[in-house]
Image (spheres, rainbow, N blue to C red):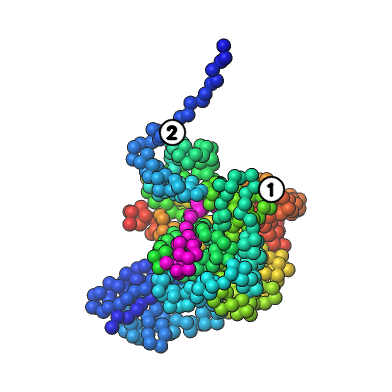
Amino acid sequence: MRQARRAIPLKIDTGAALPPPQREAVREALDAHRGAPGALLPVLHAVQARLGCVPDAAIGVIADDLNLSRADVHGVVSFYHFFRSAPAGRRIVYICRAEACQALGARALEAHAKATLGIGFHETTADGAITLEPVYCLGNCGCGPSVLVGADELHARVTPATFDILVAKARAGT
Amino acid sequence: MTTTVYVPRDATALALGAEAVAQAIAGEARRRGIEVRLVRNGSRGAFFVEPLVEVAAPGGRIAYGPVAAADVVSLFDAGFLDGGAHALKLGRADEITFLERQERLTFARVGIVDPLSVEDYRAHGGFRGLERALAMAPADIVKEVTDSGLRGRGGAAFPAGIKWKTVLDASTAEPGKPQFAQSTQKYIVCNADEGDSGTYSDRMLMEGDPLCLVEGMIIAGLAVGATQGYIYLRCEYPHAHRALLAAIANAYAAGWLGADIAGSGRRFDLEVRLGAGAYICGEETSLLESLEGKRGQIRFKPPLPAIKGLFGKPTVVNNVITLASVPIVLERGAEFYRNYGSGRSRGTLPLQLAGNLKRTGLVEKAFGVTLRELLYDYGGGSYSGRPIRAVQVGGPLGAYLSESQLDTVVDYEAFAAIGAMLGHGGIVAFDDSVDMLEQARYAMEFCAVESCGKCTPCRIGSTRGVEVIERIRAGIDRERNLELIDDLCDTMRHGSLCALGGLTPDPVLSAIKHFPEDFAPRTAA
């Protein structure tokens, strides 16, 4: 008797592992960008804009929808510095580490930030308020050291003293 | 009578407090019952007077700066809307010394126009180059760009016209694909992944005159037969992103983009795509991979992107400034543009003064100006008041130059002759507090952080480089380790596909060569 060929069942990841609101956000991101050529980065940006990160449980959903492998999607999320797999603190503080800012004291600022916040780069303060990230140039090279708070709050000529004020404001959510 | 007041929305101006100034002016005008039309322009590029507030007066725009929100009431008291005297008054904006001696071709409108207004753009000469191009044959547009001598401003300085000609002549046919699946698509891709430290001209142009970039891309599309353009913008530039989106929407609404450009029946569509914080995506093949939705890893060349680029189709990849220089070439003619410059470097270069300088900002000059003029005449020496010790030109992969090299003229060949590169025109000055060993170490560390991982000498060599420099710092086997770093740099230079691994040795070796004292044995302090 001919043995039946073993078929690997096709299992589409519908995002069952994601909480419903997150599942909805991923679905909306896919609906908005699915048709665009090279849609993956726009989809990931849209997901992160809504959820603050690209959760691991969303990878399969995105991969199946865009007809990519999970490895492809995971590879992209992990390649780019901007994408994160876990949520950051309430505010992300980016300190520019690049040469133009170094020429104006960014190294001392970086050391001050790490010491006063008690964390290193890519870490979040214990109260969950601040995540500290390095950034390699914010295009404010004429007036460094530069710091970016949140999505678009750019600060010029930041000293350790003004950094403390920025952080206090970011903590207070203003 | 309504007075027009200009307050920049440029990212650097905002970082220096321009938003609060704009709000204070609007609020104070309301309180006093004065009608003011607030225009949020780009920055003229003299950062030492930002936030720069300008008032439209019959004889020209009168500038005040640097204005803080707290100065606004006193400005109103001084009658600044009529050009009244005030401690912050600088006179006519275009007569500010830093700006007056520049030769602004690409940046002619930046800081002057309302960046988002198609009408204002038209009123300042916008779209004239495109109108001329619409009446020309594609090969003639390409010839005009070739004859202008315009070379890629992203750093590699490849002649733009030759790249365009390659794309114009490239076949879109894909052998092996059935006829129905063939597409004749070609692409224009704008590299707006301006990741080099010390550079911000792309950002300033996109925030201050985004329609100029749009116009340049449409002309490129007409020249090579491409109907789709992408601007690949780094996500670290949220302000430029907003400006581009708004300007593109306005250009569509006014009929300059889309299926029927200005009633010509020709098509060009334009979309902005965001990067995600990878320096390597400024390299053109990585950028194309990223646009296709993949990891930004380098591709082998050949095939050149001009032959097989985005989605395997012939693609022009040009930097923002290259594309934004095209409208004036078409408007005024190749001859006009090539009359600026020196040697084989034709036209102008928007240079960016950055780091430890008193007067930082954008200086657009014809090729031929010296570094010393830029640092001292324009830059005014160091910000800290200490002597300038080292200068890095061309971003994190550019060589460090010492005082004795400052008479080098800004010219691609002159820089190559001293083992340096002009790159994207960023000039970062350091005073004498700089530790060049630390700068060399950082160059290796940066390469390790940003390497795409494709080539082993770059991926592994950069980390080994950090370790070797740390051993030199610790005084361990100093001579042997200096020899080792030389050897490692040789491997990286010759064993890497792209400029990241290939040029990281430049800042490292130039630091060792020109500043050997910083690599000398250290006595415990």
Tag shown at residue B322: none
Residue B89 on the magenta span: no
**Quadrant where the N terminus of chain B is found in the figure:** bottom left
Q: Quadrant of the C terminus of chain B?
A: bottom right
Rendering quarter of residue B43: bottom left
**Which residue position is annotated with label 1?**
B457
Decide if residue B391 is in sight here.
Answer: no
Judge from the rendering whether residue B186 lies leftward or rightward of residue B522; answer left or right.
Answer: left
Q: Residue at x 31, y 74 (%)?
A: B25
Q: Residue at x 72, y 50 (%)?
A: B495
What percent of the width, then of the height, locates residue A118?
A: 45, 48
Confirm whether residue B421 shows in the render: yes
Q: Which residue corresponds to the image point at 54% horizontal and 67% vertical from the top-left?
A: B219
| Residues at discs 1 and 2 in contact (Cβ within 8 Å) | no
Q: In the image, which residues are magenta? A: B255-280
The amino acid marked with disc number 2 is: Asp
How many other residues sit within 10 Å of disc 1, few (<14), some (14-19) or many (≥20)?
many
User: Which chain contains the residue that carries disc 2?
Assistant: A
Q: Residue at x 67, y 77 (%)?
A: B342
Q: How many marks?
A: 2
Compared with B192, B120 (above or below) is below
Q: Does the magenta run of residues contain B271?
A: yes
Q: Circle 2 sits on which residue?
A: A13
Please, is residue B438 above or below residue B75 in the view? Answer: above
In the depicted view, which residue is nearer to us: B262 or B521?
A: B262
Label 1 is placed on what type of residue? Pro
Tag 2, which secondary structure?
A: loop
